[in-house]
Image (cartoon, coloured by chain):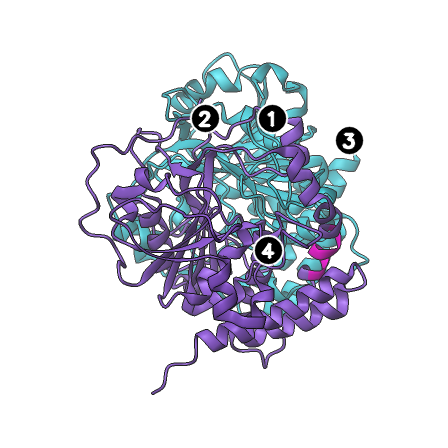
Amino acid sequence: MVDPANTVGIPVNPTPLLKDELDIVIPTIRNLDFLEMWRPFLQPYHLIIVQDGDPTKKIHVPEGYDYELYNRNDINRILGPKASCISFKDSACRCFGYMVSKKKYIFTIDDDCFVAKDPAGKAVNALEQHIKNLLCPSTPWFFNTLYDPYREGADFVRGYPFSLREGVSTAVSHGLWLNIPDYDAPTQLVKPKERNARYVDAVMTIPKGTLFPMCGMNLAFDRDLIGPAMYFGLMGDGQPIGRYDDMWAGWCIKVICDHLGLGVKTGLPYIYHSKASNPFVNLKKEYKGIFWQEDIIPFFQNVKLSKEATTVQQCYIELSKMVKEKLSSLDPYFDKLADAMVTWIEAWDELNPPATA
Amino acid sequence: MSSSEINKNEVDIVIGALNADLTQFLNSWRPFFSGFHLIIVKDPELKDDLNIPEGFDVDVYSKPDIEKVVGAANAAMFSGYSCRYFGYLVSKKKYIVSIDDDCVPAKDPKGVLVDAVSQHVSNLENPATPLFFNTLYDPYCEGADFVRGYPFSLRSGVPCAASCGLWLNLADLDAPTQALKTEQRNTSYVDAVMTVPLKAMLPISGINIAFNRELVGPALVPALRIAGEGKVRWETLEDVWCGMCLKHISDHLGYGVKTGLPYVWRNERGDAVESLRKKWEGMKLMEKSVPFFEALKLPESAVNVEDCVVELAKAVKEQLGSDDPAFTQAADAMVKWVQLWNSVNSSG
């Protein structure tokens, strides 16, 4: 039996790290009540709310939070025809928030994610842990058996090459979830009662060349290092697939990070995932993805980006060409997706012109 | 997996004795070693007689026994920490669990003593998943599973070749690190087992390890000796080299290597600063090894473990031999090891 933390009485963090350098991006279609319990840890930060679904609905943001909110009308207005790359009726729309942010770091969290407790019963400040993960190096070229070597009380083990101990910059921090685990629909149907009660007290770097299923529920990244690759694809309304937005982004960012020598971490922090989505609804959304991923994975495992691709945008455009070339035969959807990937980069560059000297 | 579910007849517990008095060590492990067959190999350079308490099913091998089996010329291969490999050689069991003689059972966060043997065997009996990373770690353990986005075709996993455990208290840090942080002790109990992904290299420690002898036995090579190798782990690299070979061969043959639980509690022995005084040869050798293993591709024709070891030895000699005589010696030892393995194990 896992419970969320009770944060009543915890004072708002008086020394919020990176307060002016980080935006919190939250997609929502219902409400933002969950922010009440996150106050101690999140209130000092600026929020970017991406409202999905009916734009006429009024989303109430709890008092005290500083935010900007975008609904579908705003997205259409800001991007014009390029708005076609932003999903509708799917939390994938959150990536619009990454695009309009002007900050260096992004933390994104789902509106059904509460504060977790560590094994000592203490409320976990997930954002603080993500920031620690992003600010200290990753070690993708050699696995450290004691996990994060930079953590208090840990270090590199005997035999770890000294030349690799400086690590590389961390682009992404992937957090985990207690209570409702992030299972696919078939697993949810078979194990409806399973809850994740195991608090694994580790952060680790995912080795170079290894792919992983990136979940967008509790995720942070360095927007300067990898932002343009965090496109969450075409999902939801009018699309043949859903619940693969974060997966798609995860495969893209990992091959690009591997190519550019950046690190991706996974593990702490935990959040408490409170809502189990309907497995039958999920199955309908994921159905095609379950088959397609059998081809998509080998595709990403064999991607080789050119030496000339030295920026994230260049890597991403190259990737989009390969998607068009190699995956369109799987389904015409990938042809559309490849185009949308290009549109995304164009929109990103428009909204984020390089700073003038 | 509880102790009662393991088929004890499939397991040998191999201990390399670098200390003569094994009373405290064996008594502390008694609850978990009970019912298993033990192979204790005495470091041929240890002069004192071994002191072994009653009540264990144990075969002890010392210098004369080693020389009888492998010949006096080859006995040097099994000195120091490498004495445990002789136990791997003569064992007839499917699984080997090997723990250094300065380790005792650890306690988990609930205060319960950890049955390292059961955990290792459980790790070895369940598949490994090196082809795709599962963010909830071991998908086969109670309360966990594969996460959304994990390809279904990869969910049956591959055979697990080795289980690399960890250490509370004195972690397996190198001499410079431990000398710098003299008071540092590992108090972090990370409750996870995970598969080290395909192509990822790692430093495998011989302090707390188990492996499937039937699957990969010959790949556990007692090969690399650094100049001035000593009787404390800070002055060795034999296990790290062995581990690099083992991981590479496992990757090539489609097997998996796991890391994480179980923990053992490792006690004080030796002096990191003292070990630092010796020239730290190991550092240089590791630096050369990494690009070698990274670029290495074993030929498609190497389809069994012995062939892989021989091919690996060839490559070591060709590409690293001129860098340091230690590599040439390692390559020769690897070839010799395979010959010994085949001769000892074919004669039944």
What is the distance, in whole Å, between disc 3 and disc 2 at their CAs? 28 Å
Residue that badge 4 annotates: A210
Callout 1 amino acid: Pro
Residue that badge 1 annotates: A192
**Chain ID of residue with mark 4:** A
Q: Which residue occupies the foreground of this view, B127 or B296?
A: B127
Callout 2: few (<14), some (14-19), or many (20+) C-alpha neighbours within 10 Å?
A: some
Could you say whether the residue bearing mark 4 is in a helix, strand or loop?
Answer: loop
* N-terminal-most mark, 3 or 2: 2
The shade of chain B is: cyan
Both marks 1 and 2 on one chain: no
**Chain ID of residue with mark 1:** A
Q: Quadrant of the C terminus of chain B?
A: top right
Callout 4 amino acid: Thr
Question: Is-magenta flag for residue A90?
Answer: no
The shade of chain A is: purple
Both marks 3 and 2 on one chain: yes
Residue that badge 2 annotates: B50
Would you place residue A259 above or below residue A210 in this image? below
Q: State the image quarter where residue B220 is shown.
A: top right
Q: What segment carries the magenta color?
A: A294-299
Could you say whether the residue bearing mark 1 is in a helix, strand or loop?
Answer: loop
- Dot 1 and dot 2 residues touching (CB under 8 Å): no
